Image (cartoon, rainbow, N blue to C red):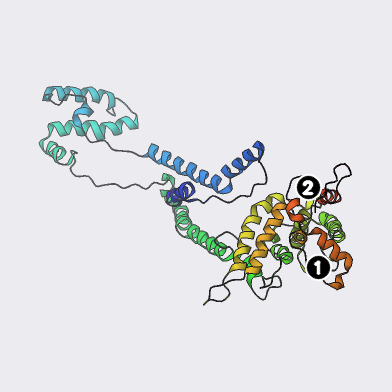
Amino acid sequence: ILSVFTIPWTINKVFCSESKEEVVHGKMKKEDVKRKVIEKVFSKSNIILALCWVVLIGLTIYISSNAKDEKPFDPFDILEVDKRADAKAIKSAYRKLSLKYHPDKNPDPEAHAYFSEYVSKAYKALTDDEARKNWEQYGHPDGPKSTKFGVALPSFLFNENQHVLLLASIVAVAILIPICITIYYLNKSKKYTSNNLHVDTISLWGHPSSPVHIRQAHSIHRVLETFSCAAEFSEMPVAKKTFPHLEDLMRTLIRSKAIKEGEKMHKKKVEFVRVHFTLLAHMNRIPCDPSLQQDKVLKATLPKLMAELVKVAAMPRVARLHYGWFVPTEAVIENLQCISQAIATDIKRPRVLTAKDGAGSMKAAQSKMGQAGLLQLPHVDESVIKTMAKGTKESGVRVK
């Protein structure tokens, strides 16, 4: 039973497993490469599979060591005589073994059993015509023997006092365990997609009744709000001791105009707010407290979630025409570029401003146009761009 799922699971692991996509920022250190290899080798599934193989090999060794293979009954071999021996040599060999194994000479029960089952019957097969005929025809002086079948289970289970334990073991292995595995698989398949993402995430992004669903005119500035409401992030608890750091980060984001004061963040879960704020801080290159960051989790889930968000944005909206929306799809892809390059969406694509926003806001927006390409360069930030725009007295070179 153990080999029924252990062997196919191993084949699937070795030959059919798909390599997971990983986003690598820069050149990885040897320590990071070593750590990733160790995490991949000693994953939970690999450890469970290794334990299954250990149990399977242990059971195989136990069964093979306790199996009793009956040798063919050979009276000449038992009496230790040649096959061309005469009656006198056979009788002499029988007497010699009688002195060694007969109950009157050796009180050991094993010696008595060997004498009655083998020595005496071997002598009978070579001296009695009927017994010899049975041995030549059926392989034993007693005639045809009934075939015995064994079960590869410990012998103590078949004792009279262990009937309840044996029945319970059969019910557990044959009924309860398969049912539990089936229920677990069905429940998991209802909650997760084929890409191992929450079904609730797809529903939040794609269902029209959701407050953060993808719209036809979804802009690049709203993608992050939609993305941060993924159900996967609700499984990342936020400790209460980090609440003050989260409030400080919100004030910093408001001062840097990454978010507007008065946005309805109180209606969202604190887990979603934490992801939203930390990603905004990353894109605006604002340092935040290490207790708020979830680098390992975000690096593992962000590429998959963004790829799924692209699919949701581009899914066909009219079944007969099979067309999707281009604007939200482009916005999601550009937002992923902003995250990977640590560039604010206002720099990548400045917001459309009106006269109500004031001349200062419009001037600031115009000054940011074209900075996205420069900010991708290493060691270049807004202060460097301002210096480049002013130029230097020595060279007189300015960058427009």
Neighbor class of circle 1 (other Cα within 10 Å; few <14, some 14-19, many 20+) is few
* Neighbourhood count class around disc 2 (C-alpha, 10 Å): few under 14, some 14–19, many 20 upward: few
Q: Which residue is mark 1?
A: 266
Foreground residue among 312 and 96: 312
Mark sitting earlier along the chain (1/2): 1
Q: Nearer the viewer, residue 187 or 310?
A: 310
x then y, percent, for residue 19? 54, 49
Q: Quadrant of residue 223?
A: bottom right
Tell me the element at label 1.
Answer: helix
Q: Does residue 161 appear in this view?
A: no
Give the amino acid at mark 1: His
Task: Write down the residue under mark 2.
Answer: 380
The mark total stands at 2
Residue 95 coordinates in the image, percent (x, y): 20, 23
Q: Amino acid at mark 2?
A: Val
| Residue 110 seen from this side | yes
Query: In the image, residue 131 lies at what x, y percent?
Result: 14, 37
Residue 198, position in %: x, y?
A: 62, 63
